């Protein structure tokens, strides 16, 4: 039994029916064998199930579930689920003919809008059959408390292989043993121990936050004064938009993809990073969408951009910090937008390093956890959601944009080849749009998830991203 970290626990406390807190991956699979359609799909599902069963020990969170203390006062724990049943997590469905991308998006949107059940490990996968061209889709969702986006992306490499022949996976060194369900008296005693230690841990967390900032300040060499030195971020600088409002449970998704080689060519031509190109693509797409839906705001959008702080040897859970990036949607020139984003991301990364940002989010979560109890957090989130307070308050940010490195080699599984891997991240109250991009060997896959009522015509944003990359490619001299 393992105590849930404070940052992971925050993902549990934040979840409401209107705000499921899971990440998703949609793996598009192209069959490599000559079986007839029915035989191929039956074979693919049985082989996929076998692949999961053989490799569960490589992904420990897949057999761990949450146990919460009495009255939601004590900290939650992960236990090896004594009632684990793979068939409750892996199922198959078939799309109605003709099985195009719109039908897949409809299915994924419905799948995304429901919370994972807490009485079992926090993941679910569906093998979707009936796609055009005989393709299949493995649609997976995993709770953010179990894995962040970067760790979730690594699952593809553990479930799949670098060659069609596959690889031999040795059995675990020790057989898997489920935990015994903790008793109410044990959980009550653990809750009392936890409460007794909260004051000391709160002081420690506050001290770590102060020390991190002081240490970073001392470690930075003195710099001459510059205009950016006086540019202090403001908490409520994000402009209001259509998608900055209270959420409903309904979700829409949209997908697109571009050549990864084209993105890298743009990066080299303009001296930027891949992440800068991704942000510029999103900026141009959002500019076009906003111009059609309510008009452009009078100041830059604010995107929250996750930054991985995962170290070698870190396992599941969240190892992430964030930076806030201003997107210059007022500019009508795609190259100017890209170069402005290059300067903005460099500036925000410097601020992040100076502030000790890599540990700041974790230490802040530790502090909040130790001056409250889980019940208080869930009650506050529930009150915020039920009263639709996001409709009345200015947004802290407009949207989340994530760029995740995906598998760098071709991958195969169950007689199929991975052609695309579309990622999706959760939306939050007051921020009803999430864009996540993931690279594969030769494609950059774009996934957008939104609250349906807040972002009509979501596919236009995905299409706009592709167009923006094309515009930047045309500007290469």
Image: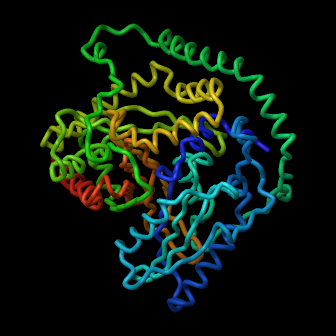
Q: Residue furthest front?
A: 387
Residue 186 in which image quadrant: top right
Identify the residue at horizontal 56%, vertical 18% (top origin).
209
Image position, residue 94 (x, y; %): 49, 81
> What's the colour scheme?
rainbow
Identify the residue at horizontal 32%, vertical 40% (top origin).
276
Image position, residue 356 (x, y; %): 50, 21
| Residue closest to the eye, 10 or 390 | 390
Residue 131 in which image quadrant: bottom left
Above or below, 299 relative to 413: above
Image position, residue 83 (x, y; %): 78, 62
Tell me if 43 is positioned left or right of 334 in this view: right
The number of callouts visible is: 0
Identify the residue at horizontal 62%, vertical 39% (top origin).
9
Above or below, 165 relative to 24: below
Above or below, 422 relative to 12: below
Above or below, 230 relative to 163: above
Identify the residue at horizontal 80%, vertical 44% (top origin).
1
Q: Residue furthest bottom?
A: 36
Image position, residue 476 (x, y; %): 18, 48
């Amino acid at each position: 039994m393992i105590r849930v970290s404070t940052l992971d626990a925050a993902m549990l406390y934040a979840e409401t029916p209107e705000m499921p807190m899971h990440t998703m991956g949609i793996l598009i699979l192209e069959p490599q064998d000559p079986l007839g359609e029915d035989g191929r799909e039956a074979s693919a599902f049985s082989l996929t199930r076998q692949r999961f069963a053989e490799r569960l020990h490589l992904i420990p969170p897949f057999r761990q579930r949450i146990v919460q203390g009495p009255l939601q006062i004590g900290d939650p724990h992960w236990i090896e689920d004594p009632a684990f049943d793979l068939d409750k997590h892996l199922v198959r469905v078939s799309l109605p003919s003709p099985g195009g991308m719109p039908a897949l998006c409809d299915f994924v949107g419905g799948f995304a809008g429901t919370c994972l059940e807490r009485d079992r490990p926090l993941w679910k996968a569906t093998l979707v059959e009936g796609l055009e061209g005989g393709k299949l889709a493995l649609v997976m969702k995993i709770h953010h408390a179990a894995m962040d986006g970067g760790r979730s992306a690594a699952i593809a490499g553990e479930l799949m292989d670098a060659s069609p022949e596959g690889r031999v996976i040795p059995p675990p060194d020790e057989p898997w043993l489920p935990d015994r369900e903790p008793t109410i008296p044990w959980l009550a005693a653990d809750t009392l121990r936890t409460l007794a230690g909260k004051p000391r841990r709160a002081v420690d967390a506050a001290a770590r936050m102060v020390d991190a900032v002081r240490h970073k300040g001392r470690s930075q060499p003195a710099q001459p004064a510059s205009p950016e030195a006086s540019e202090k971020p403001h908490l409520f600088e994000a402009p209001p938009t259509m998608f900055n409002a209270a959420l409903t449970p309904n979700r829409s998704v949209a997908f697109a993809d571009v050549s990864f080689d084209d993105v890298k060519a743009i990066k080299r031509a303009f001296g930027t990073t891949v992440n800068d190109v991704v942000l510029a693509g999103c900026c141009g797409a959002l500019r076009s969408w906003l111009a059609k839906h309510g008009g452009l705001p009078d100041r830059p959008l604010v995107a929250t951009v996750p930054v991985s702080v995962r170290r070698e040897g870190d396992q599941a859970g969240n190892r992430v910090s964030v930076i806030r990036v201003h997107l210059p949607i007022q500019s009508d020139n795609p190259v100017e937008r890209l170069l402005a984003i290059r300067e903005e991301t460099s500036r925000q990364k410097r601020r992040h390093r100076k502030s000790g940002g890599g540990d700041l989010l974790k230490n802040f979560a530790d502090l909040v956890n130790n001056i409250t109890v889980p019940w208080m957090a869930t009650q506050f989130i529930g009150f915020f959601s039920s009263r639709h307070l996001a409709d009345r308050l200015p947004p802290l940010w407009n949207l989340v944009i994530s760029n995740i490195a995906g598998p760098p080699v071709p991958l195969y599984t169950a007689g199929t080849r991975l052609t695309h891997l579309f990622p999706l991240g959760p939306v939050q109250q007051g921020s009803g749009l999430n864009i996540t991009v993931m690279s594969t060997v030769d494609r950059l896959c774009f996934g957008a998830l939104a609250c349906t009522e807040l972002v009509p015509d979501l596919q236009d944003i995905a299409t706009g991203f592709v167009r923006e990359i094309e515009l930047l490619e045309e500007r290469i001299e």
